[in-house]
Image (cartoon, rainbow, N blue to C red):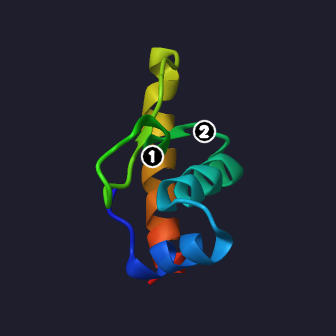
Amino acid sequence: VELPPKAIDEAVEQDVTPDTLYALSLLEETGICVVPASGFGQKEGRTGFRTTFLPPEDELDRAIVEFKRHHGLFCQKYT
């Protein structure tokens, strides 16, 4: 996940990894739970998350829309 520099600065200020900041925001905003990839020993400077995502087929489109909506709002907040 590509994050704006201000989001990374905010994560440093909050003493969390950037992907933790993103994951918590996603959970609070959408109810979608992901695990920050930094907990799995990812390459330094890489930001991402892991999830097991098995919604019923009729809910998949809505979930994708929510992921996209959140990412847009998150980036806008820190731009």
Residue ID for mark 1: 38
Q: Earlier in the sequence, mark 1 or mark 2?
A: 2
Please tell me in which quadrant of the rendered image residue 11 appears.
bottom right
- In-front residue for pair 76/33: 33
For label 1, the SS is helix
Q: State whether residue 16 is above or below residue 58.
A: below
Disc 2 marks a residue whose amino acid type is Ile
Q: In the visual, does 42 lie left or right of 18?
A: left
Observer-side mark, 1 or 2, equals 1
Percent across and percent down for residue 55 are: 52, 20
The 10 Å Cα crowd at callout 2, few under 14, some 14 to 19, many 20 or more, is: some
Quarter containing the N terminus: bottom left
Residue ID for mark 2: 32
Q: State whether residue 15 is above or below residue 28.
A: below
For label 2, the SS is loop
- In-front residue for pair 15/32: 15
Q: Are marks 1 and 2 in contact (CB under 8 Å)?
A: no
Percent across and percent down for residue 33 are: 61, 37
* Residue 78 - label: none
Percent across and percent down for residue 22 are: 53, 57
